[in-house]
Amino acid sequence: MASRAGHRLTTAATGAAPDGLSLSVISPAIGAEVEGVDLSRPLEPERLAAIRQALADRHLLVFRDQRLTRDQHKAFAALFGPLHVHPYHAKAPGADREVLVVKADETSANVNGEEWHTDVTCHEAPPWLSLLYITRTPEPGGGDTLFASTARAFEALSEPMQAFLAPLTAMHEGAKLYTGNYDMAPPPGGWPKAVHPVVIRHPESGRPCLYVNRGFTTRIEGLGKRESEAVLEMLFRHVETNPEFQCRVRWTPGTLVMWDNLSTQHCAVWDYYPHSRYGERVSVVGESPQTLLSS
């Protein structure tokens, strides 16, 4: 299954960008900056199709020097599907339920996403796509986000390990992150939880991707407690500690990053306390992740 040269993965082709799009690749495994696109203006169908193809190829896209209202941000996200409502907003009926504010300053006890995770995998149909628009960055710098390709991470595993993981499923629980890390009281009915395949097939690229993450995944179904903990910890560290799967995005005011949650994990670096950072995230609902073994 894996493409190898000796014991190392071969570099994925980074060839020409889709027609009508100018890309600058961030790293061989993941990420590209898109040049010359104003997201506040209507996009031609061809340009939108090129962005979608680039996203499937590169997992995440960076758009700089944007000037977006909240409605324009949401309108661009809605071109890719229905907008997601975060579990936080079950407790905040007065807020814009389709926008998650991402901010930190000198009063913050923690920040959104400072642990490796994939967004809201505790939902039965988790967000497929997330779009974070940052408008204020820390004065001395910092506040970068690390991203990892879970497609490349799967390809780097041995073939026996790939075969072992392919039929397994795992439990994802909102309480692990929202109560366990952020000490938030659950909303009425409790935090969501769902069972997903450990390895999924990406619906657009067809590539297998690891789909467990430290933020939400609590156990692998059918394994003993110690077995599950050992396998999950190995997979978490495999994604989190290997720079060959990763890229680092430096934020500047007016930057929008969109990423594919089916093929990535990410981690926000909180290295700027007590300075402030502000942004808003809009996400797009996907279908339930499909097992690698499905036809």
Image (cartoon, rainbow, N blue to C red):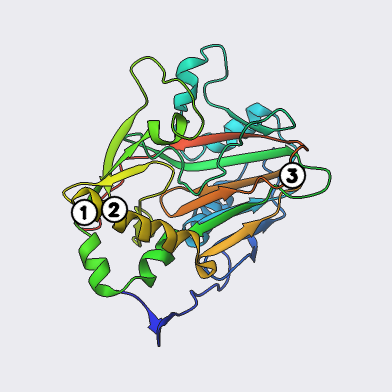
Which mark is first along the chain, 3 or 2?
A: 2
The residue that label 2 is drawn on is 198
**Residue 153 shows in this picture:** yes
Q: Residues within 10 Å of mark 3 (few under 14, many from 20)?
A: some
List x then y, in percent, for residue 222. Answer: 16, 49
- Rendered residue at 49%/27% (across/down): 183
- Rendered residue at 49%/59% (across/down): 240
Q: Residues within 10 Å of mark 1 (few under 14, many from 20)?
A: some
Give the residue type that dot 3 points to. Tyr
Viewed as shown, does residue 285 lie left or right of 107? left
Viewed as shown, does residue 180 lie left or right of 163? right
Find residue 138 and report its image quarter. top right
List x then y, in percent, for residue 268. Answer: 60, 47
- Marks 2 and 1, Cα distance to the nearest angstrom? 6 Å
**Observer-nearest residue: 157 or 16?**
157
SS label for mark 2:
loop
The residue that label 1 is drawn on is 168
- Rendered residue at 55%/74% (across/down): 15
Find residue 125 and report its image quarter. top left
Q: Circles 1 and 3: CB distance less than 8 Å?
A: no
Give the residue type that dot 1 points to. Leu
**Observer-nearest residue: 128 or 198?**
198
